[in-house]
Amino acid sequence: MQYTITQHNIKILSCILIVLILGSCCPVDAKSIKIRGTPGSVEAGSTMNLDALNFPELYYRMSNGETYEWLNITFAKNGTINEGGAIYTTKVYSSKAIMFMGNKYYSIDTGKAYLLSKKLSTGLKDNKKTFKPGEACEVCEFSQNYTFTVLDIDQNGEKATLQLTKNGEVVKIDVVGIGDKFEYKIDIANSSDITIFECKVDTMMHGTDFNRVKLKSVKHYCDTPMILDIGDKFGDFEITSIAEKTIEMKNTKTISCSPDETVVLMDGWLDLKVSKDGERGYIYSTKTLECPKPVVVSPVTESTNVNSTASNVSGDTDVNNTVTAVLPTTSDAKSGDASAITTETEQPVTLASAGGGTATRTLPAPGILSLVSMFAVLAFINSRKN
């Protein structure tokens, strides 16, 4: 499977990296960034046609050079958009994937793009897994409660019995061979036979002490998708068309924006900002990113006793002049608070002078922040995979 990073993804990732770098230097919990579209005229008769090439929030695939989201705005008067003058369109790409108002979904009804589901993690690396008979695998996130199990392999190693349960109840059991698909389908809204879980048997082996079934192409979708319908409203916009591969929305009432004013669009996903002279403006989206917290090194004091522990430190001194550092407890480290993390080799600490007293310092711990930044970027890329 080949993954691509789109042009607009690169721009967004650049913003994220900047925020993460800044976050490593200042003790703040979160930062907001603005992803802006190309500015344009908002005077009467002008248009603002946005896609991924001039507004990185919208989706574009570098692999085929196509954009899959558009926002076209016509200004009837200065700073005024008449009813129906703003049109948002999104299109299915890469088989089932579709972007909708800043979030990635999967259109799980191949006949009409009105069931938008999240693809759930199976916990399998590269969507592949080798099972022993009787070994279970949790194939869904918390509230879904699905479990997949290989029950048995026949003596010839040609057929395997596979089972899928939800909340302990068997919802699908089937006997499949190498190359066969195992699928679980349900009815949702007005659509029937919607695939919620599927996998393909790659290989299987049967022996006296060795039994294995290898799966590939494991996919699992949320069985409670967002169900869209014509007339559904999102702020001042409503869905006006749903086709096999596209969804279209338009504004349902006049939108007016005065000079130096910001107007919220599409239920807060986008904003329109007009310049002070009222002649130009731009569309933007706001992303809030959590910043890593700096590591706080606890006060260090001189102990009164060579056997002093981290939980019993005083400011008195004795002939041994022993120094004891206060370390976080195990429960603190598990809490996820960056202040509970210690890095003995990464951050040298200047201890209190021999005359007594404490030395408290707040350190950015770049080694830890670099790892956090890397994982944040990788997670973002993974969420925007084709």
Image (spheres, rainbow, N blue to C red):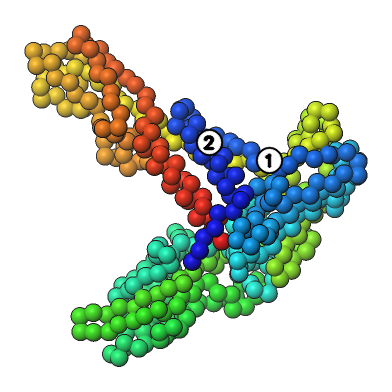
Q: Quadrant of residue 123?
A: bottom left
Nearest the viewer among 139 and 287 is 287
Q: Is residue 116 in sight in this rendering?
A: no
Between discs 1 and 2, the one toward the N terminus: 2
Disc marking residue 49: none
Q: Secondary structure at mark 1?
A: strand
| Left or right: 150, with 4 as reference point | left
Q: Position of residue 278 (x, y in %)?
A: 84, 32
Asked if residue 221 shows in the view, the reply is: yes
In this view, 201 is above or below 230? below
Q: How many marks?
A: 2
Badge 1 amino acid: Arg
Residue at screen point 28% across, 26% down = 348
Please state if 149 lies on the left or on the right of 119 as rendered.
left
For this rendering, which residue is in front, 52 or 174? 52
User: Split into 4 quadrants, where in the image is the C terminus?
Assistant: bottom right
Q: CA distance from mark 1 to mark 2?
A: 16 Å
Q: Position of residue 27 (x, y in %)?
A: 46, 28
Residue appearing at x 40%, y 69% in the figure: 128
Residue 361 vertical position relative to residue 327 in the rendered view, above or below: above
Residue located at (69% from left, 50% from top): 53
Residue 260 occupies quadrant: top right
Q: Please give the residue where the numbered disc 1 appears in the rendered image.
A: 36
Q: Position of residue 220 (x, y in %)?
A: 49, 68
Q: Residue at x 33, y 34 (%)?
A: 340
The answer to whether 377 appears left or right of 368 in the picture is: right
SS type, badge 2: helix
Q: Residues within 10 Å of mark 2 (few under 14, many from 20)?
A: few
Amino acid type shown at disc 2: Ile
What residue is shown with label 2?
18
In this view, the residue farthest toward the top is 355
Q: Residues within 10 Å of mark 1 (few under 14, many from 20)?
A: some
